[in-house]
Image (tube, rainbow, N blue to C red):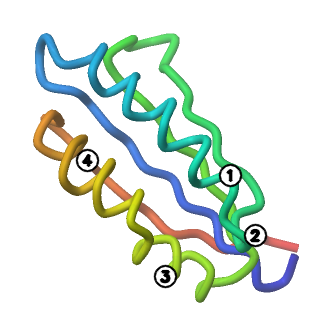
Amino acid sequence: MGNTIVITAYWRPKDGEGAKVEAILRQLATAIRSEPGNLLFVAHRSKDDPAEILLYEQYKDEQAFLDHRETAHFKTLVLEQAVPLLARREIRMHSILE
């Protein structure tokens, strides 16, 4: 796990756009999980704030994450479709402490 990259992304859909964002995430999950460098992709809804979505992703290394950002499904589903529906999008990259 020495090179594993963890991504946390916090999304908050604009008012009234939650169902559209959830539909996009269902498509996105299937596509991301089929990427050769993806180890895990899970979308979570906050118990404290149901409008808040946490995306938790693991990639085998930083190159796999960079490759992910170049895929057609990332560009279409995230950048073109989801981002315009979001009031907030915050992304952090982490390494695993061993």
Residue 63 vs 43, above or below: the answer is below
Q: Residue furthest front?
A: 72
Q: What amino acid does circle 1 point to?
A: Arg
Residue sitting at x 55%, y 75%:
65
Looking at the image, residue 63 sits to the left or right of residue 16; the answer is right
Residue sitting at x 51%, y 53%:
8
For the residues carrying marks 1 and 3, which lies nearer the camera in this image?
Answer: 1
Inter-mark Cα distance, 3 to 4: 18 Å
Tell me which label, 2 or 1, sits earlier in the chain. Answer: 1
Which image quarter is the N terminus in? bottom right
Q: Percent position (x, y) of residue 26?
A: 51, 30
Inter-mark Cα distance, 1 to 4: 21 Å
Q: Which residue is mark 4?
A: 89
Inter-mark Cα distance, 1 to 3: 15 Å
Inter-mark Cα distance, 4 to 2: 22 Å
Depth check: give the residue in front, 86 or 34: 34
* Label 4 environment density (alpha carbons within 10 Å; few <14, some 14–19, many ≥20): some
Q: What amino acid does circle 4 point to?
A: Arg
Looking at the image, residue 56 sits to the left or right of residue 98; the answer is left
Query: Tag 3, which secondary structure?
Result: helix
Q: What amino acid does circle 3 point to?
A: Leu
Looking at the image, residue 6 sits to the left or right of residue 51; the answer is right
Q: Which residue is mark 2?
A: 96
- CB atoms of marks 4 and 2 within 8 Å: no
- Please identify the quarter of the rendering in which residue 10 is found: top left
Inter-mark Cα distance, 3 to 2: 18 Å
Query: Tag 2, which secondary structure?
Result: loop
Q: Which residue is mark 1?
A: 33
Tell me which label, 1 or 3, sits earlier in the chain. Answer: 1
Query: Tag 4, which secondary structure?
Result: strand
Q: Which residue is mark 3?
A: 66
For the residues carrying marks 1 and 4, which lies nearer the camera in this image?
Answer: 1
